[in-house]
Amino acid sequence: MRHFGRRTKGFSIDLLYLPALILLAMFVVYPMLSGVQISFTNWNGYSAKYKYVGLANYVRMFQDKMFYTALKNTVIYGVGSTTLQTVIGVLYALLLQKKFHGQTLARVIIYLPAMIASLIMGYICYFLVQYNNGALNDVMKLFGAEPVDWMADGSRAVWIIVVINALQFVGKTMIVMIAGLQGIPELYHEAAEIDGASYVQRLWYITLPLLLPAITTSVVLNLIGGLKLFGIILATTSGGPGYSSHSLSTLINYLYFQNQNAGYSAAVGIFMFLFIMFISTFVRGYLERKAASLE
């Protein structure tokens, strides 16, 4: 009876996985496999007819200047946003980890933008940097400066988008860092202070090394979010001027809905998935090895 009970219990536990597995198959596995299939076709996204073209879409992708521009911008969005979020998030966490009057309010204000949809955040920030009646240009006019069309230059637009994305989600980084700081025993700091270590020395040799697991988690999540950035770009530039601020995500949207080239769009999507998986796995592995070497 005991043996039967174990088998029954084991079988019942396995059944509990079925809803999750069904949802995973419906919304992840099947769309992924369909995307792979479509990437080998010339489907326009609407017609019931299409034909297989082999690797033609992938060959075209690696010969497309627009693709390389989007790939470069994607790296900038991912690395730039992650760097800013990590640095500012750590500073916020160091500032707000200790109790003081208004601490909770300060944390809420910093975290609040992360609760807004990226598309809405993009529209809000666009009203700040737009040429006509933009808040930033209005402030410049008060000091006698000429207004600037901030989003007219593709390179500048890319970095403005990086800053917007970083400031929106820096609150999430701050929360992760505060949790990491609270897990560091105060005993280490007290011992170092007794030995005459300055605050900067304690920060560099104790706090940051012990905070590395939290930094790893935050960096990987922020990097994935930055590499698949979509909403803010769509709201501020729609990939323009021209195609100079496209990310891979917005390029996929453009190719499918505006260019009516679902096959090529799917090929870019498959590349994007593999690219983000490779980069995030590599960065996570490097940071985890770095943390292990400091133990």
Image (tube, helix red, strand yellow):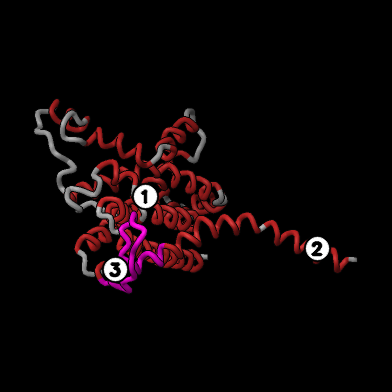
Q: Which mark is residue 87?
A: 1
Task: Give the extent of the magenta segment.
Answer: 35-59
| Foreground label between 3 and 1 | 3
Q: Residue furthest right?
A: 1
Residue at x 30%, y 58% (from the top left corner): 44
Q: Residues within 10 Å of mark 1 (few under 14, many from 20)?
A: some
* N-terminal label among 3 and 2: 2
Q: Is residue 36 left or right of residue 257?
A: right
Q: Which mark is residue 57?
A: 3
Q: Which mark is residue 237?
A: none
Q: Residue 153: where, in percent of width, then height?
A: 15, 47
Is residue 121 in view from this perspective?
Answer: yes
Residue at x 66%, y 58% (from the top left corner): 17
Q: Amino acid at mark 1?
A: Val
Q: Which residue is mark 2?
A: 8
Q: Residue 33: where, in percent of width, then height?
A: 46, 65
